[in-house]
Image (tube, rainbow, N blue to C red):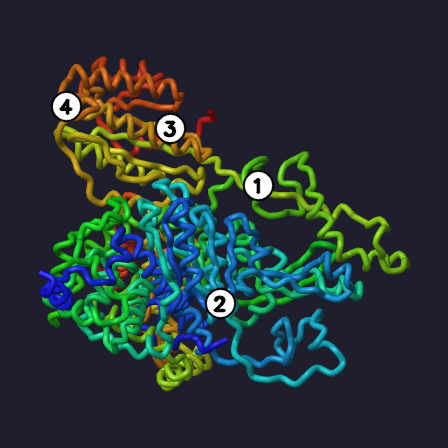
Amino acid sequence: MSAPFPFAAIVGQEEMKQALLMAAVDPLLGGVLVFGDRGTGKSTAVRALAALLPKIELREGCRYNCEPGKPVDICPLCTGGKPPRTRMQPAPVIDLPLGATEDRVCGALDLERALVSGEKAFEPGLLARANRGFLYIDEVNLLEDHLVDLLLDVAASGVNLVEREGLSVRHPARFVLIGSGNPEEGELRPQLLDRFGLSVDVASPDTLKERVEVVRRREAYERDRDGFVRAWSRKDGAIRRKVAKARTTLDQIETPDAVLELASNICLRLGVDGLRGELTLMRAARARAALAGRNEVTKADLVAIAPMALRHRLRRDPLDEAGSAVRVERAVGEVANGVAGHA
Amino acid sequence: MLETGPADFLTPAAEPAPPANHMSAGDPAWSDALCAARLFAAAPAAIGGIHVIARASPVRNRWLEAARALLPKDTEVKRITPAVSAGRLTGGIDIAATLAGGTPVHETGLLETVTGGCLIVAMAERVTPGTAGIIARAHDTAPGFGIIALDENDGDEDHTLPGAIADRLGLRVRLDGIAIRDALSDMSATLLPDEGAIRSVAIPDPLAETIVAVAAMLRGASMRAPAQAMLAARILAASAGRSETSPEDVATALRLTCGAMIEAPAEEAESGSADTESEDDTPPREERQHDQPDTPDRDPETDPAFDPDQLKELAIAATQGAKLDLDLFHQANMTRTRAQSAAGKSGAVRQGARRGRPAGLVARPPFPGARPNVVATLRTAAPWQMIRRKARGLPAWTPGEPLSVRPSDFRYVRYAHNTESTAIFAVDASGSTALERLGEAKGCVELLLADCYVRRDQVALVAFRGDGAEVLLEPTRSLVRAKRSLTALPGGGPTPLAAGLGQALDLADRARRRGQSPLIVLLTDGKGNVALDGTQDRQAARADAQEMARHAALLGVRSVIIDIARRPRDTARTLADAMHADYVTLPRADAGAMSGIVADYLKAPR
């Protein structure tokens, strides 16, 4: 496979880039949902992200992406007599194709071994391959309902349970879910919407200059992929280091009480149900602070990430002309400036 | 005379039609189509593909032949139909061959075999979004392949080429309306430019800006469109042997990729054609047609709602190096996206349907009494044979022996079937209270859609005023789409009640053909004053409306008339009687009450 389009070379789309980087810094954030028209660079950005993720330690050939310290008991490789040496490898970014069958996603009977040697063996699916990495679903709103249910379950529990066809297998599947789609082709079920930590809307750039730049860069990339990637490798490298550093400092980031209070107030004011909203707000704000290289969360962090953390959690009011992002911004503005205080 | 003749012939001024023209003298649409085929052949994967809008016809066959002849001899060309299964596209283990051979036999997916080649999608308008997603993904994976999508759609909104594919196809070709005698081609002499030549062509900044601006106007937000147009312009320039694109190249490229009808500035066009006349006869042929702005293949429906003058100005400004401001076009661009975006349909399938389109296999019976699918069951059982025999201490299976099939092997076909209702609002947008009424109807539409997850219903809106009825919102389930389409609502003028009713019936009929149950919600006071033929005649208008109402009764469409007159009189009630419709008075139409009424109807079993 040839090198993906460099992340740093994507023109504009700051909100989407920020959200993806935050998800890379904190896998527990709950993933990102990217909604927007076709051809606005959603897939490009996600595929570019793969090059920026910090490498993970893996045994060569392991199909469950086991952590070398605590291998999965069903992994024949890592629990075998003489496991291969560990190596630092790029974190997996797995594409979940639309037409994927349940077998393909969760894993199923290893057909090849069953047919040839008559062995009953489990062949891990895409969920195992996405373990410790990213699972990307393009056109997530077109995914079959039963697959969506299955993904939700696994994403929430971090464990994939297969009970079928005489197989009984469980293995860890901890991944960051990234979905993209075009809202005009059908919307996402509210239950699935809520599972995503962050949600961003993308549009293509609206100034002529930027649009020309987008096309020019794309052409340069098509002309000489390796050369283009090399030309941007320094900027990509800087982002990669920023992500890696933010990951290590994430645990030490302080959250002042005032910021916590502000987060609660925003959620109260918007009537966001459950604690998930507040939790995501705090996590996202910390990820942003970590990316900026600070060791304390500020109110500015919170204000900046509130729209992407909350816009998909609002109860829908179809008669409100303004988009949900505007509603969040309005509420944040009111609360942050102390106009309204407690709702 | 004899002396002057040949001399005249030699001077270009006396011979307005260059010799190259005699071949394509017939139909510019046909030579455009051939030009698109050449562009495609020069870089199939990079330009994405060709969206061919045409019925099956000899002309289409000729065009396909020509297009195939242009591709290198060893190119892999595969043709698929919408019925192709996902497994066939992506490949896997061939169970039968593996069992027979005793070694794993991999079946290569169709999309894999076509890599670097060309995929022809027949009846592309019937491809499901799921299949489209699979094809699109394979297309994105380098080195990809070119797609020729044969779209036979004929103004039928129910079946359109899914956006996932349409957006990746760089070129658009319309073949309908081309006479067979014009469809002549001789591709033997065609020389395609090589990749290096295409890449080295430069596009001056002003022309690049024109491309981007025009693409934004005509093909909306997608950034693929300008990239495809630029590539097309490059190929055109390269095949004419130029190292820089000319305004003509750009005009042709935009016409073929975005459907833009632009004339290049006059003096530029002249110098351009003077240059190209000395060239080989292939490329300049097409560049002649933009001198005729009204090419017959213009179709009001697909031709975007833009102002040709504006475009022309844009092109002229760009070629003169002026800076452009895209904000000006942004509004136009947005409305364009709205109009163009195809209705995606997803998820609206009933669980456990007993009929409909097969939608995969399940291990549990989808409805009580379902019969297992024999082939699928055997397929599931096959890999287990050796394991089961081993467990019972039997030797390996040989042909002729019985298979051991267990209950866990049973597989059932799951059917997907659209069951939703479609509420069609026909709103009287005439007179003074029109705006208010439309506003409330719009609110009602949005309230119903916000609720749609519960019931999976679709909503459409027809407004009638002035001299006719207009579909403001095609049946949709998307709140986003409804909001976008209903931003500006026109109101005022006389009342063409019959036309509005007719339009609503039309939509209802289409919904029914899709297997949905339509519900017409007519918001009116029943007082029409414009007849079907557009004349303002109260008497004729009433007769026409009654006629339409009886027609509706015959069709048996469920309908409800909401009387919105301040003081309800008999007019609406008689209409309801003729229509066999329910009659509700709601003098102060408000969105909440209305959506309550309609929701009750939608929920009620038929």
* Residue picked out by circle 4: B535
Q: Where is residue B272 in the image (x, y as percent from the top left)?
A: 17, 69
- Pointers 3 and 4 within a single chain: yes
Q: Position of residue B606 (x, y in %)?
A: 46, 24
**Mark 1 to mark 4 CA distance (whole Å):** 50 Å
- 2 and 4 marks on the same chain: yes
Residue at image location 71% in from the left, 52% down from the top: B379
Q: Position of residue A185 (x, y in %)?
A: 39, 50
Q: Is mark 3 on a helix, strand or loop?
A: strand
Residue indicated by mark 2: B73
Q: Where is residue B88 in the image (x, y as percent from the top left)?
A: 59, 56
The residue beneath circle 1 is: B415
Q: Are marks 2 and 4 in contact (CB under 8 Å)?
A: no
The residue labelled by disc 3 is B519
Q: Do tag 1 and tag 3 residues touch (Cβ < 8 Å)?
A: no
Please determine whether, in this image, residue B193 is positioned above or below residue B181: below
**Tags 1 and 2 touching, CB below 8 Å:** no
**Are discs 1 and 3 both within one chain?**
yes
Do dots 1 and 2 share one subunit?
Answer: yes
Name the quadrant containing residue A303.
Answer: bottom left
Q: Can residue B109 be seen in this view?
A: yes
What residue do we see at 40% from left, 79% from top? A225
Three-letter code for the amino acid on which mark 1 is drawn:
Tyr
Mark 1, other Cα within 10 Å: few <14 / some 14–19 / many ≥20: many
Front residue (pair B96, A107): B96
Do callouts 2 and 3 mark residues in contact (Cβ within 8 Å)?
no
- Amino acid bearing label 2: Lys
